[in-house]
Amino acid sequence: MLEDEQLLSLDVAASQLGVPTKDLRTYLQKQRPKGGVQIPNKPGGNWHLQPALLTQLGFAGAPGLNAPLVPISDETLDSLDWSEWIPFAQAANEAPALPGVYVFRQQGSDSNPPLYIGAAGERNGKGVRGRLRIYSSGKGATSGLGKHAMDRALADPAWVKELLQQAEAGTADKVESVARRAIDRLDGEIRWVTCVHRKAAIVLESALLKKHAATVWNVVGVPKDADS
């Protein structure tokens, strides 16, 4: 391990994954995942891995790597490279256009539990950012976080009364605006972690849903789609 840069050598990483060094090198050369570093950065340079990439390959694997997968522990979840919590209103612009998992909770206290956990695959190169922009634009009122927010808003008599008053006054909002308001009323914040590929996002989302099953709104069994 190169302590100054917190990188694992190719041989060490391959040994920890339980795969041949040549297979790991081939994967890095073909896929060039985030967290794979070539030094020097030119043909013939030696490959190294950031610990975060090694962790994800360990629990999710990758094409061409016949590695024994390891279960995701609480320690693994805590060790991931999570972003800072930011208000929902900022998240769509700051989230990465990469596969990953995002967590939504109410603002106000670090002890507030997760309320929604979702994942996004590549989504035509838009990743987590693409999914959050669907919510922030109000176009996700019937799926994922948007649906859960709308269901709770419609169960709030005061909120529904406000909509009725606007309709009676001839100033009713369009559905996209109403859907966005439904999320805004939750006063939420979001953080995320990027993933090496779609499968890693699915596996990680499943582990987080199981861990936080007592508080999240979307526990409906093992996720079947990374774009939930």
Image: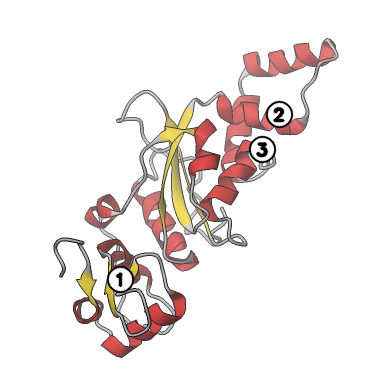
Mark 3, other Cα within 10 Å: few <14 / some 14–19 / many ≥20: some
Name the disc covering residue 137, or none: 3
Of residue 186 and residue 24, the one placed in the foreground of this image is 24
Whether 137 is drawn above or below 58: the answer is: above
Mark 1 or mark 3: name the one nearer the start of the chain.
Answer: 1
Whether residue 20 is visible to the viewer of this picture, yes or no, is: no
> From mark 1 to mark 3, how far is it between C-alphas?
36 Å
Whether 42 is drawn above or below 143: the answer is: below
Q: How many marks?
A: 3
Which mark is in front, 1 or 3? 3
Helix, strand or loop status at disc 3: loop
> Position of 163 compared to 79: left or right?
right
> From mark 2 to mark 1, how far is it between C-alphas?
42 Å
> Position of 104 compared to 67: left or right?
right
> From mark 2 to mark 3, how far is it between C-alphas?
8 Å
Residue under label 1: 58
- Residue type at mark 3: give it: Ser
> Position of 226 compared to 44: left or right?
right
Which quadrant is the N terminus positioned in? bottom left
